[in-house]
Amino acid sequence: MSGSWTGKVRRATLEKYQPEDLLPEEQPAYVASWIYIFGVATIAALVMLIASGLVLTLQGPSWWHTSSVGHYVNSVHLWSVELFFIFMVVHLWGKFWMAAWRGRRLATWITGVIAFMASIITAFTGYLIQTNFDSQWIASEAKDGFNSIGVGAFFNALNTGQAILLHVSLLPLALGIIVVWHIILVRKKGVVPPIDNDATIEGGS
Amino acid sequence: MQLAIINLNHPAHYISFGPFAISVGNLVVILAMTVLFLLALFIPFPHSHSGKQAKK
């Protein structure tokens, strides 16, 4: 066994994250409920968001004003984000009422909370780059809000270029990392059992 | 300009209850999420046709 860092990382990763846990073929019986669907529905909406967003980045933020194809792709992006938030909120309610942080799953809960907040910020920057009167109004109102809490020097809502770059690069990257981390934790710890389930399974370390 | 099913080209409609006010659009979304949540709790989940038992 060599002492190379690649070998150490591989062994540590395989020890901590078993392939059988990350890509399981079966789930506990209690998962057979519609309330457990909304996490993966949120991911499905996120995939549609990213796919339609990638197409929109090829043509720029004004494309949808002048092209029927652009309008269609923009509408796919809009309705994907509507469904993304609807599914995520129902997922949040479901997990809150089943106290999904039980069984050493606090990190799973926290990463979900951070993903929710990062999604709100990402959606906000999306509203800023509609390049219409709506985005103008939102930007001018938000500018006052940011200045009132003292962050106007770091984030200028009237700077459309900054909003575009945040929306298509930094924020999706951050959100993507948090979501992947959240999913890995769900797989590693297992889906939280119902509160009245006698066979409450600890989610491991 | 393409015709929309719902004309959104006007100021939002608001519903007020004393000091509280909410736009009709936001209220519709919140009600839809609540209905979806309740349906998810009460509608039975279809069982697998493969006959394979889920892990207990």
Image (cartoon, coloured by chain):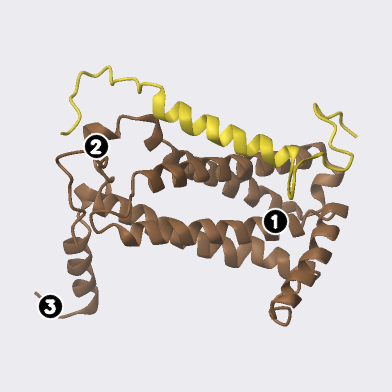
Chain colours: A brown, B yellow
Instruction: Report the mark closest to the observer, 2 or 3.
Output: 2
**Labels 1 and 3: the sequence-earlier one:** 3
Q: Amino acid at mark 2?
A: Gln
Name the spot of residue A101 as percent of width and height, x first. 32, 55
Reading the image, the residue beneath label 2 is A27
Identified at 79% across, 71% down, the residue is A144
Q: Report the residue at 40% width, 24% height from top.
A: B42
Q: Chain of mark 1?
A: A
Q: Quadrant of residue A7?
A: bottom left
Chain letter of disc 3 in the image:
A
Query: What residue is shown with label 3?
Result: A2
At horizontal 54% and vertical 34% (from top left) the residue drawn is B34
Q: Which residue is label 1 attached to?
A: A126
> Disc 2 is attached to a residue of which chain?
A
> In the image shown, does A163 or A52 lie closer to the viewer?
A163
Question: Is label 1 or label 3 in front?
Answer: 1
Mark 1 vs mark 3, CA separation in Å: 49 Å
- Identity, as a three-letter code, of the amino acid under mark 1: Gly
